Amino acid sequence: MTEARFYSVLEDGVQCLLCPHHCRIREGARGLCRSRECRDGKLYALSYGAPCALAVDPVEKKPLNRFLPGTYCLSLSCTGCNLSCRWCQNSDISQVAPEETDSGVLPPEEVVALCIRRALPSIAYTYTEPLTWWEYLHDIASLAHAKGLKNILVSAGYVEKEPLRELLPYLDAANIDIKAMDDSFYRTYCGAALQPVLDSVLTLVGHGVHVEITNLLVTGLNDSPEQVGRLCAWMAANGLQEVPLHFSRFFPRYRMRDSVPTPKATLLRAREIAASYGIQTVFLGNL
């Protein structure tokens, strides 16, 4: 059991301050991410050192097409997510508690040693929401950084400013998934809010982290020219025209199994819109 960071003690439990949800957690209960629990008046990170997924992936799968291209990374994940996207492709590990999956035991030192043994240049924290297992991510990333390895964050970016700032010295690259440029969309379909995500992107870019942005175009929900244009306009207004942008094709998953996959024409149109706003590098994914 590892005590969590970023919380305050209340009379009837604790309040988690890791992400903008600010979950108030009573004794014996857990936050929305399912992986942080109040015990004896303290908050604990239940998934620390217990990854549920470990793989070697091409870095382009993250997707990162302009960071160490042609190399492989050690991909690692624990259970937990602070969003509840209805189309989640990894819901079997992101939308469950740690005890509901098969997990191994892998201390941070062994993760770094494994990466070195396999001659992999980077570690990717991915598949679920790495920021919900912040303590494990932080400890691995700091050790990896000291050994000259690169750290890749694959995230929805829904986190408070201080936890993100503490990670910045160790992060080399990030892919941030912007669901839509619409706060009501975030609240309805993801159980979150938009502004903290945009703040995270700007913070990462401002500190020299290599950032690429992914926008999954979900059929009939966020794939209109207006929605795509709002994302591209925001990028242009914030000087992010050089940030690679990935439009990704949606396939029916999780609670949206009866939906229709994104037509190829929708992605091609999105690429044209991005180009019209001066976005220099656009990739189409899942085609």
Image (tube, rainbow, N blue to C red):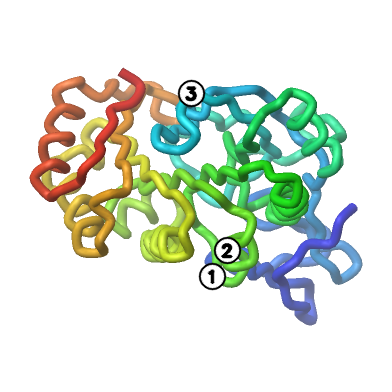
- Which one is nearer the viewer's eye here, 281 or 77? 281
- Tell me the CA gap for discs 3 and 2: 28 Å
Q: Which residue lies furthest to the left in this view?
A: 276
Q: Can residue 245 be seen in this view?
A: yes
Q: Is residue 193 visible?
A: no
The amino acid at mark 2 is Leu
Q: The residue tagged with tag 3: helix, strand or loop?
A: loop
Q: How far across and how far down the image is residue 47, in percent?
A: 78, 45
Q: In this view, does 175 lie above or below 21?
A: above
Is the residue under label 1 in contact with that under label 3 (CB below 8 Å)? no
Q: How far across and how far down the image is residue 35, in percent?
A: 72, 49
Drawn side of residue 73 relative to residue 11, left or right? left
Drawn side of residue 245 relative to residue 56, left or right? left
Drawn side of residue 160 relative to residue 223, left or right? right
Q: Which mark is residue 161?
A: 1
Q: Is residue 278 above or below residue 254?
A: below
Q: The residue tagged with tag 1: helix, strand or loop?
A: helix
Is the residue under label 2 in contact with that under label 3 (CB below 8 Å)? no
Q: What residue is pinned by disc 3?
A: 70
Q: How far across and how far down the image is residue 197, in percent?
A: 42, 59
In the picture, the quarter occupied by the C terminus is top left
Q: Which mark is residue 164?
A: 2
Q: Quadrant of residue 244?
A: top left
Query: Residue, x 48% and y 55% (percent of image)?
Result: 209
Query: Residue, x 27% and y 21% (percent of image)?
Result: 260
- Tell me the CA gap for discs 3 and 1: 32 Å
Drawn side of residue 65 relative to residue 1, left or right? left
Is the residue under label 1 in contact with that under label 2 (CB below 8 Å)? yes
Q: The residue tagged with tag 2: helix, strand or loop?
A: helix
Tag nearer the camera, 3 or 1: 3
